[in-house]
Image: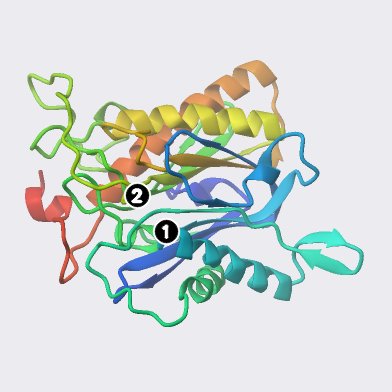
Amino acid sequence: MRPGARNLITDVAGLTVGHAEDHRIRTGVTVLLGEKPFTAAFHVMGGAPGTRETDLLAPDKLVQEVDALVLSGGSAFGLDAASGVADGLRALGRGFAVGDQRVPIVPGAILFDLLNGGAKDWRENPYKGLGRAALEAAGPDFALGTAGAGTGAQTHDLKGGLGSASAVLDSGITVGALVAVNAIGSVTVGDGPHFWAAPWETGDEFGGLGLPSGFAPAAEPPLMKRAGEATTIAIVATDAALSQAQAQRMATAAHDGMARAIVPSHTPIDGDLVFAAATARKRLSDPLTDTFLIGHAAASCLARAIARAVHAAETRKGDLAPTWRTRFGNG
């Protein structure tokens, strides 16, 4: 298993990603766009999620494919970002056909970044416009760190951010992850620079530091954020042809990657969730073995993407938490 050419979720053929940010508000939106509709599913393990149109992602529902997935800051206000994406897709003639109408299917999820020092004095919800702008910016390359939905994110003791990673299996199937890290937990071990995700690092994509000597399991973690101030939201994707049920299993397996990279994760006051996307560019040669390996790769990619998000975060005036680079330099 090796990284794709970009080491981004857009190594999965048929997908692009767009960001839009407002640094005054300290927030942003990230859109995953399909070249054409793609199979999608999701799984939530956090106790405080915020979502749009996730009920339709169950395998027994009528609509089996979506046009885009949206990750946004802004708590419940951020759910409006998907409306901006839907408007933009409708203008492009995209969407589920109902008679002579097209209804874009755009599930989304939000994280809480309302108490991060940004100006939240808007008179009109800005997220619809940010969603439309993120859609228009979609392409194969995109920024990590303080960008998109990760713009205003924070973790237990460091600035959070937006991360991505990819892997190509021996079968030729590609898997990728995209994540906005805003966790109540920590992505680093103790007070040092080492990432919990170190065992799954490829090369030196987030510093190459490994685990600290004398590594030991974490003690009881302090509760630094208040209820509702957290949530890590992610998308894992593959170019394999998966059913909606198989895609949901990929999303479920990917939560292992979140638990490897954030300690603690899936708490009652995080809204941790994972979307899955499958573009059906490659058929499964062995459904059991392939889905097993895809799930493992999704978890590994998500762990790596979480560490990359924090490793790449940039300092902005007025930050309430230091970046990894500010605190540790080169580690």
Q: Which residue is mark 1?
A: 75
Quarter holding the C terminus? top left
Q: Determine the residue located farthest toward the bottom in the rendered image.
A: 123
Q: Is residue 52 left or right of residue 322?
A: right
Q: Is residue 314 left or right of residue 271?
A: left
Q: Position of residue 260 (x, y in %)?
A: 32, 28
- Residue 197 found in image quarter: top left
- Looking at the rendered structure, the secondary structure element under dot 2 is loop
Q: Position of residue 91 (x, y in %)?
A: 71, 76
Q: Is residue 194 above or below residue 118?
A: above
Q: Is residue 201 above or below residue 312?
A: above
Q: CA distance from mark 1 to mark 2?
A: 9 Å
Residue 277 shows in this picture: yes
Query: Residue at point 61% right, 17% down?
Result: 289
Query: Residue at point 38% right, 45% down?
Result: 232
Quarter holding the N terminus? top left
Q: Nearer the viewer, residue 11 or 300?
A: 300
Contact (CB < 8 A) between labels 1 and 2?
yes
Q: Which residue is mark 2?
A: 228
Residue 242 shows in this picture: no
